[in-house]
Structure formats: C-alpha cells, structure tokens
Image: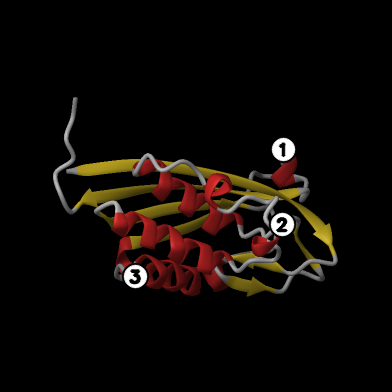
C-alpha cells in the first residue's frame, strides 16, 4: 500500500544567521533563515510531507519550538528521527520531490549535495530524491528576498497492510 504526503515550510531571511538548505550550509553574506532550529525550510518541508503521508502530524508536534532541546537543532537529525518514526509505524520512503522557492542565492551548485543528504537521512538511493530550485521572478516575499519557502511531496510504502474501516 502506498501513501502520498505534501509538506510546506517558510522562514524569514535575517542578518546574522547561517543559511542551511537540504543540510548544506550556503554562503549568503551573513543572511540566513530565522527559526528555533537551523530553520532549514527544505528539510522541514520534507519532514512534514513524510509525517503527513503517515498521518503522524507535523514537525511542530514532534519537535516544538517551545522545547529547548530543539534550539538550533540540526534539521538533518530531525529528519532522521522522522524516518525512525516512520519505520516504527511500518513505513518506508519510496521517493521525494521537493522545490525550493528563493530569489537568491543561486542553488544549482548545492542541489546534488542536498539530494545526497536527504537520501542518506531517508535511507533511499539518491535517485529517489529530487530537489529543484526556482525564483518567483521578483514577485511575493520570496521574490523580494524576505524569505525562502519549500514544497515537498513524497510517496511512502507500508511494510505491513494497514486496515481500513
């Protein structure tokens, strides 16, 4: 049995923070994403897609920003924990397709490493993970360089049959 999930995340860009996307630190003139954790919108969207496909809530329920344990947390570690939760529930990741919406910086040089990081955390082959980046042609908050957003969809396979009512 297969399950589909969708995730979305957005964070504001601010000075004085490092920029992490897909578990990769990206040079961006001292401008990064504001958040309780490392604010990696790509990994947060992927985590939410996976949790949603398994009907396990969202990352805020599992890693609340009110919990000091997650202050400046590495989102790759959080994603690994999500995958552990999925395995406990009998799910395995089949594939992930994600899109980052950012006017700047250019992300093409980092995409392959992002794919590898996500694949490793999710225990799948790199060719099961797609990461794309797009601008919004100067439109909206991402186009104005006020923030970065990400969407992700995933497919899970149930290792055991789930009973329907």
| Dot placed on the residue nearer the N-terminal end, 3 or 2 | 2
Real-space CA distance between mark 3 and mark 2, rounded to the nearest whole angstrom: 28 Å
Name the residue at 30% across, 48% down: 155
Confirm whether residue 38 shows in the render: no
User: Mark 1 — residue?
Assistant: 140
Q: Secondary structure at mark 3?
A: helix
Q: Nearer the viewer, residue 10 or 158?
A: 158
**Residue 126: mark:** 3
Name the residue at 35% across, 42% down: 53
| Dot placed on the residue nearer the N-terminal end, 2 or 1 | 2
Q: Position of residue 136 (x, y in %)?
A: 64, 44
Q: Quadrant of the N terminus?
A: top left
| In this rendering, position of residue 130 left or right of residue 87 | right
Q: Position of residue 7 (x, y in %)?
A: 48, 44
Which marked residue is nearer to the observer: mark 2 or mark 1?
2
Within 10 angstroms of label 1, few (less than 14), some, or many (20 or more) residues?
A: few
| In this rendering, position of residue 53 left or right of residue 162 | right
Q: Secondary structure at mark 1?
A: helix
User: Mark 2 — residue?
Assistant: 36
Residue that lies at the very extreme toward the left in this rendered image: 161
Q: How many marks?
A: 3
Asked if marks 3 and 1 touch (Cβ < 8 Å), the reply is: no
Which marked residue is nearer to the observer: mark 3 or mark 1?
3
Name the residue at 85% across, 67% down: 16
**Residue 152: mark:** none
Within 10 angstroms of label 3, few (less than 14), some, or many (20 or more) residues?
A: some
Q: Nearer the viewer, residue 132 or 126?
A: 126
Q: Position of residue 109 (x, y in %)?
A: 56, 73
Confirm whether residue 91 shows in the render: yes
């Amino acid at each position: 049995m297969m399950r589909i999930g969708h995730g979305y995340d957005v964070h504001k860009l601010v000075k004085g923070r490092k920029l992490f996307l897909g578990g990769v630190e990206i040079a961006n003139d001292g401008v990064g994403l504001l958040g309780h954790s490392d604010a990696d919108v790509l990994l947060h969207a992927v985590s939410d897609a996976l949790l949603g496909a398994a009907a396990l809530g969202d990352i805020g329920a599992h890693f609340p920003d009110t919990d000091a344990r997650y202050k400046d947390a590495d989102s790759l570690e959080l994603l690994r924990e999500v995958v552990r939760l999925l395995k406990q529930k009998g799910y395995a990741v089949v594939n992930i397709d994600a899109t980052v919406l950012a006017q700047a910086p250019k992300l093409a040089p980092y995409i392959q490493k992002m794919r590898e990081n996500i694949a490793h955390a999710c225990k799948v082959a790199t060719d099961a993970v797609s990461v794309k980046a797009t601008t919004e042609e100067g439109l909206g908050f991402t186009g104005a360089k006020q923030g970065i957003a990400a969407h992700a969809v995933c497919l899970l396979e149930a290792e055991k049959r789930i009973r329907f009512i």
